[in-house]
Amino acid sequence: MATNQNQLFIQHIRNNADLSKGLAGLRKLDPSLGIIIDSLREVPLRLRPPGFEGLAEIITAQQVSKASATVIFGRLLNLITPLTAEQFLHAGEAPLIEAGLSRAKQTTLTGLAQAVVNGEFDLEQLTLLPIHEAMDKLTSLKGIGPWTAEVFLLFCAGHADIFPAGDVALQHAAGDVCGLTEKPDGKTTRQLAERWAPLRGVAARVLYAHYSAHRKIDTIPV
């Protein structure tokens, strides 16, 4: 029996088949979360390529609403095509201002682009590192904090056991499914998520979908 359960655990979410397997494993870990899964019309995969564009989208989403981030990033994609590190640096400051990026995000994205072009950051290779090593590498760059790094490793690297506990939507959703009367803080949310290890990345997708269904808005960062 233990062997069968272990077969339901995955290290990476690369496609919908992986996600389905992860959801099956999550039902084994926490049958009460299985009820939440059954209530949802869909648990979106939302996997993005692990390159400069993917991380740039997440950086754009820092500390703004999903709607605002979508508009700003859409402008950026129209102004810099393709959105690679090289093209970003070549474009200069004007399109960044026109897109509506804050000064802080311009600085972060420029630093990231320079690191990629200089060979200091290989984002695709970074996705293959153990989570703690990848987190250390990502957060070493000024302007990239734990939330940004965790969302990148969740939706671009496809790690199955990472949970952006600092995300307000996940905090609300975790408190809801765990029966709390108030939204937990980041530390408490991280503790609550431990029950879903080693499938916290799958649980995060379920909670995003749960929150979106109840609030009638799309809250997934990418």
Image (cartoon, grey):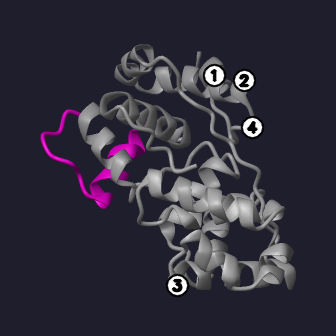
- Residue 209 lies, in percent from the top left, at 45, 32
Is residue 144 visible to us here? yes
Marks 2/4: CA distance? 8 Å
- Going by the numbered disc 4, the residue's amino acid type is Arg
Quick one: label 3 or label 2, which is nearer the N terminus? 2
| Residue indicated by mark 1 | 20
Question: Are the two marked residues, 1 and 2, in contact with CB atoms closer than 8 angstroms?
Answer: yes
Does the segment drawn in magenta span residue 195? yes
- Residue 98 lies, in percent from the top left, at 61, 74
Quick one: label 4 or label 3, which is nearer the N terminus? 4
Q: Nearer the viewer, residue 210 or 63?
A: 63
Quick one: label 4 or label 1, which is nearer the N terminus? 4
Question: At 72% from the left edge and 23% from the top edge, which residue is drawn?
Answer: 17
Using a 10 Å C-alpha cutoff, classify the residue at mark 2 as few (fewer than 14 neighbours), some (14 to 19) or many (20 or more): few
Which range is magenta? 178-196
Is 103 positioned to the left or the right of 181 in the image?
right
| Residue indicated by mark 3 | 103
Marks 4/3: CA distance? 34 Å
- Going by the numbered disc 1, the residue's amino acid type is Ser
- Going by the numbered disc 3, the residue's amino acid type is Arg
Is residue 8 visible to us here? no
Question: Are the two marked residues, 2 and 4, in contact with CB atoms closer than 8 angstroms?
Answer: no
Mark 2 secondary-structure assignment: helix
Q: Nearer the viewer, residue 144 or 32?
A: 144
| Residue indicated by mark 4 | 14
Using a 10 Å C-alpha cutoff, classify the residue at mark 4 as few (fewer than 14 neighbours), some (14 to 19) or many (20 or more): some
- Residue 126 lies, in percent from the top left, at 76, 64
For the N terminus, which image quadrant?
top right
